[in-house]
Amino acid sequence: YDGSPAGPREDVALELGYDPLMFLEDASATYGDAVGLRLANARVVLVSSPALAKKVLMCDAVDGVPEFQKEGTAFFPGSSLAGNGLLVSDGETWARQRRLSNPAFRKAAVETYAKCMVDVGAKIIARDWSRRGVRDVYADFNDATLEIVARALFGADVEGARAATINRAIKDSFEFFGRRAATGMIIPEWAPTFDNVRYNEAVKRLDEEVYGIIAKRRRATARGEEHESLDLLDRLLRATDEGDGSVDGVGDGGGMTDKALRDELMTLMVAGQETSAILLSWACALVAEHPNVGDRIADEVREVLRNKGTGSTLDAGDFSKLPYTEACVLETLRIRPPAYMVGRCAARDVELRPGVRVTKGTTVLVAPYLIQRDPKYWNDPVAFRPERWLVQSPYSDGALARDALKSLGPNDAYFPFGGGARVCIGTGFAMLESVLLLGMVCSACEMRLPPNSGPPKPKALITLRPESIELEIRPRPRKV
């Protein structure tokens, strides 16, 4: 149809499935920043410039409906695990759930989870990283971030046997999604294949536990019982929809149903656990390649703790005192973004720019992986240089570049957490968790790539995960 972006004539599903990153790089190099693709039976457009990313992610609304939305996006199927949570819902369902969820992710609320993050980090270091040896860092961080998100969501209700059940079921579910992404075949979840049966059993176990916790909390609330420290479930239970202050944002004064609560809790578990594990694993791999970076993080943490006194540990108040550690996290997200592609679906025919149009129902893939490594927008784009985030940014009114996780980054070319109204609700949680844990492991340990092994290779499935990250860990000598 006239105005569709140019692209390969043949179906590219096999090429994309074989090596997604190389395909993305080749397609954008050959056809430019808007590429028309045929993937199986779907019409898809790949965009890889800040201007087009902004058009899609921060899109206009016509008659209250955004030009691009989640519903109908190919290759980003919903599932019985996440239900109709924030990750996949649209329209008023999404808007209401977002309004109800926002208070649980404000800065003051997120900071209350710092103790749990530090406790889990200390446990992992003492148990697994206190002796010299080679560790599967990705597996360790998967365990750590799963425990953190479960404790942040459910507090003391996930201990012992219940914690083990939830952890096992979540791992079974993630393994299922990994296998499904690797094969490229999406068999309906109701089909009685061996893999589906095992996955559906995992979801059933999770549902039993989560609905049980919700019912227990509702009974406690009805009796007027107060939790000593609020977890995310408490905050979501207490939330009422008061609207968002906009002309049409009139809330209904109600809260979440059990089903809506369950869907949001599962969404937060799914979205918040694996991506954080991937981010921390890549950060440690990059530190292992650049030992001076780990030394500098350790010095920064040591200085913060020295000023706090003997026996002290990191807490939420230290986040702003760890600018270099934060810069390392931001730089990791730039060159190894876990969400390497973001999908939307055109809700109507849209002109991306003069002469380039997409038709209603077309999936548009925005590629942070390409834009965040493009030499047109970044100096030395594939180099790991945390210090680039510590300079005055000409794009952010003189603020440090690292302060510009807002909008689409300091130069409109950085959005590891997405952008626009649907920017990741857990950005603050993820940044606090990553900075505290990276600071802790670097101050406790030195990390190196094992002899005769190169840097870990990325594996682009649903997320940009490492194939595996095995690093040589040794306790860091104490400075007197």
Image (cartoon, rainbow, N blue to C red):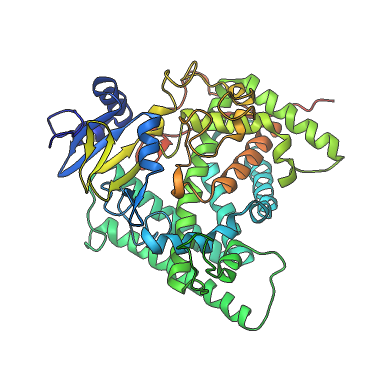
| Residue that protrudes farthest toward the front in the picture | 247
| Residue that protrudes farthest toward the top in the picture | 380
> Image quarter for residue 240?
bottom right
Q: Nearer the viewer, residue 387 or 196?
A: 387
Numbered label tally: 0
The image shows residue 359, relative to residue 25, as above or below, that is: below
Instruction: From the top left corner, tell me how far across and down residue 181 is, in percent.
Output: 30, 44
The image shows residue 22, relative to residue 105, as above or below, that is: above
Instruction: From the top left corner, tell me how far across and down residue 192 is, in percent.
Output: 22, 63
Instruction: Please tell me which residue is depicted at 68% across the width and 47% down the height of the picture.
Output: 118
Instruction: Please tell me which residue is depicted at 41% across the width and 60% down the height of the picture.
Output: 94
Instruction: Please tell me which residue is depicted at 31% across the width and 24% down the height of the picture.
Output: 25
The image shows residue 235, relative to residue 9, as above or below, that is: below
> Split into 4 quadrants, where in the image is the C terminus?
top right
Q: Nearer the viewer, residue 24 or 188?
A: 24
Instruction: From the top left corner, tell me how far across and down residue 393 is, in percent.
Output: 60, 25
> Image quarter for residue 127?
top right
Left or right relative to 350: residue 275: right
Residue 476 in view (yes/no): no
